[in-house]
Image: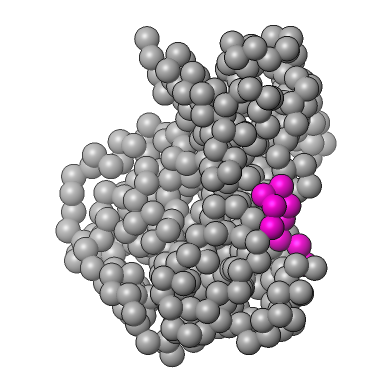
C-alpha cells in the first residue's frame, strides 16, 4: 500500500471534498451561475485577506500574480526595491528587470530577514523607488519577515508595499487593510489547500490608482483589464471554472475553521517540528525569525538534503523538500501548512528521524517524536482549558 503525504511548501495536501469539487459538471463562465460563484469566492477572499478592496483571481501559479503586480504598478524605467534573502525575493528582482524596471536589490544571507534597518537604508540609497517588494514568508528559507513594521516605514516614505504571501498566507497573519498593505499576492496550492492553477492578487486603493495610470505591457494578466472585468464579477478572459468550484469549497473549510485557528495550527505544528529537530541535535537555518510555513533543518556533514527527500518519498510516500540554490543539499524543508493535522506532523517527524538514522546520523529514534508529541499535547490541553474557562 502506498499513500502520498505532502510536507512540502507547495503543492500541499488537498482535502477530498476540494478535489471532488473539480469533477463537478462544467458551467459556462459567462453566465449568472458562474458570476454568483465568483462573487461568493471574492467575498470570502476579502474576509480571509482582511480587505474591502478587490481581490483578483488569475489563471497561473503565484509567479503569474507576482508578474501582474509589477506590470500593473510600475512602468519601464521606474525604480523598485526588492529584498532578496532567498529564491523568491530573488524572483521579484528578476521579474522587475524582465519588465524593464530599475531594480535596487538588497541581497542578504538566507538565515537573515528583511529588517526595518535594511528597509530604511534601502530607502536612503533609492529614495525615488515607487514600491518595495518583500515576502511574508521566504519559501526557500522559512524566514518570516516583519511585514507590519515594514509597511509602517513604507507609508512614512509614501512608497507602495507589495507582499508575496504565496506560501505565508493563510498560515500566518497578514491582515491587508489593518497593516496598510498595497498589494498582496498568493496562490491556490499552498495554505489554500487546492491544486495549483490560481494566482490571487489584492489591491489597495493606492495600488488601483497606480494600475489606472500605468501603461499595460503584459496582455493576459493586465490588471487594468482584470479590474474592469472584476467590476462585472468575471474575468477578462476564459475563467478557471473548475478551479473556482474548488476554491469555493476550500474557502468554506478555512472560514469554518477560522483564521485564528488556522494560524494557531500552523504555528504549533511548526513549534513541534522545530522542537523535535533541536531535540535530535540538528540546527535550523532560520533561528532569527522562524516562520510557520516550513522548518528548514540543516544537514550534518556528508548527508545530502536531496537524498534524504528522495529516500522518504521512495520508501514511504513522505514528501519533504530539499533546499534551493546554494542550499540544495544543505537543508531539508519540512512543511506544516495547509491541510495538515497534528498526527500528520508527528508522522513527518518520525519519517525524518528514520531517514536520518538510515543516513548515519547519531540520533535516538523516538526522541524527536516525543518532543513533538509533548508540544502538541500541551497545546491541546491549553485549548481545552480556554474552552472550559469561556463556557
In terms of depth relative to the viewer, which is nearer, 198 or 362? 362
Residue 142 vertical placement versus 341 (above, below):
below
How far from the left and from the top, in percent, is residue 379? 76, 30
Q: Residue 50: percent from the left, percent from the top?
A: 59, 63
What residue is rendered at 48% in x and 85% in y? Answer: 77
Magenta span: predominant SS is loop
On screen, residue 91 versus residue 33, left or right, reads: right
State the residue in front, 342 or 84: 84
Which sits in the foreground, 339 or 59? 59
Question: In this image, 218 relative to 101: left or right?
Answer: left
Q: Residue at x 77, y 26 (%)?
A: 278
Q: How many marks?
A: 0
* Part of the protein shown in magenta: 108-116
Q: Residue furthest front?
A: 302
Against 177, residue 337 (above or below) is above
The verdict on residue 140 being magenta is: no
**Is 117 placed above or below 338 here?**
below
Task: Find out whether residue 110 is within the magenta segment.
Answer: yes
Question: Would residue 170 be visible to someone looking at this image?
Answer: no
Q: Quadrant of residue 219?
A: bottom left
Residue drawn at (52%, 34%) of the image: 321
Q: From the viewer's perspective, is 194 left or right of 23?
A: right
Q: Is residue 106 above or below residue 21?
A: below
Residue 3 in sight here:
yes
Amino acid at each position: 500500500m502506498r499513500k502520498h503525504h505532502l510536507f512540502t511548501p507547495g503543492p500541499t495536501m488537498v482535502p477530498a471534498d476540494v478535489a471532488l469539487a473539480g469533477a463537478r459538471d462544467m458551467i459556462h463562465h459567462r453566465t449568472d451561475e458562474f458570476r454568483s460563484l465568483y462573487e461568493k469566492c471574492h467575498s470570502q477572499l476579502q474576509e480571509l485577506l482582511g480587505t474591502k478592496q478587490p481581490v483578483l483571481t488569475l489563471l497561473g501559479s503565484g509567479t503569474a500574480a507576482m508578474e501582474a503586480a509589477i506590470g500593473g504598478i510600475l512602468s519601464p524605467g521606474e525604480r523598485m526595491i526588492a529584498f532578496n534573502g532567498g529564491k523568491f525575493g530573488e524572483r521579484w528582482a528578476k521579474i522587475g528587470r524582465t519588465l524593464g524596471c530599475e531594480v535596487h536589490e538588497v541581497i542578504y544571507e538566507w538565515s537573515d530577514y528583511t529588517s526595518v534597518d535594511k528597509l530604511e537604508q534601502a530607502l536612503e540609497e533609492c529614495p525615488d523607488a515607487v514600491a518595495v517588494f518583500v515576502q511574508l514568508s521566504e519559501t526557500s528559507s522559512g524566514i518570516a519577515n516583519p511585514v507590519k513594521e515594514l509597511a509602517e516605514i513604507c507609508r512614512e516614505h509614501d512608497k507602495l508595499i507589495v507582499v508575496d504571501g504565496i506560501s505565508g498566507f493563510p498560515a500566518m497573519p497578514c491582515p491587508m487593510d489593518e497593516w496598510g498593505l498595497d498589494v498582496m499576492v498568493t496562490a491556490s496550492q499552498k495554505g489554500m489547500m487546492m491544486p495549483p492553477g490560481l494566482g490571487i492578487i489584492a489591491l489597495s486603493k493606492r495600488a488601483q490608482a497606480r494600475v489606472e495610470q500605468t501603461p499595460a505591457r503584459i496582455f493576459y494578466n493586465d490588471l487594468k483589464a482584470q479590474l474592469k472585468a472584476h467590476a462585472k464579477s468575471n474575468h477578462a478572459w476564459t475563467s478557471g471554472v473548475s478551479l473556482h468550484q474548488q476554491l469555493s469549497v476550500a474557502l468554506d473549510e478555512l472560514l469554518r475553521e477560522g483564521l485564528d485557528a488556522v494560524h494557531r495550527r500552523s504555528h504549533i505544528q511548526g513549534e513541534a517540528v522545530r522542537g523535535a529537530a533541536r531535540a535530535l541535535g540538528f540546527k535550523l537555518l532560520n533561528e532569527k525569525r522562524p516562520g510557520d510555513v516550513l522548518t528548514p533543518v540543516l544537514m550534518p556533514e556528508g548527508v545530502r538534503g536531496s537524498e534524504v527527500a528522495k529516500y522518504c518519498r521512495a520508501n514511504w510516500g513522505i514528501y519533504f523538500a530539499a533546499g534551493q540554490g546554494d542550499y540544495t543539499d544543505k537543508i531539508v524543508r519540512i512543511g506544516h501548512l495547509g491541510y495538515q493535522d497534528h498526527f500528520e506532523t508527528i508522522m513527518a517527524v518520525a519519517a525524518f528521524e528514520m531517514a536520518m538514522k538510515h543516513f548515519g546520523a547519531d540520533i535516538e529514534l523516538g526522541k524527536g517524536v516525543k518532543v513533538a508529541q509533548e508540544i502538541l499535547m500541551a497545546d491541546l490541553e491549553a485549548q481545552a482549558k480556554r474552552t472550559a474557562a469561556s463556557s
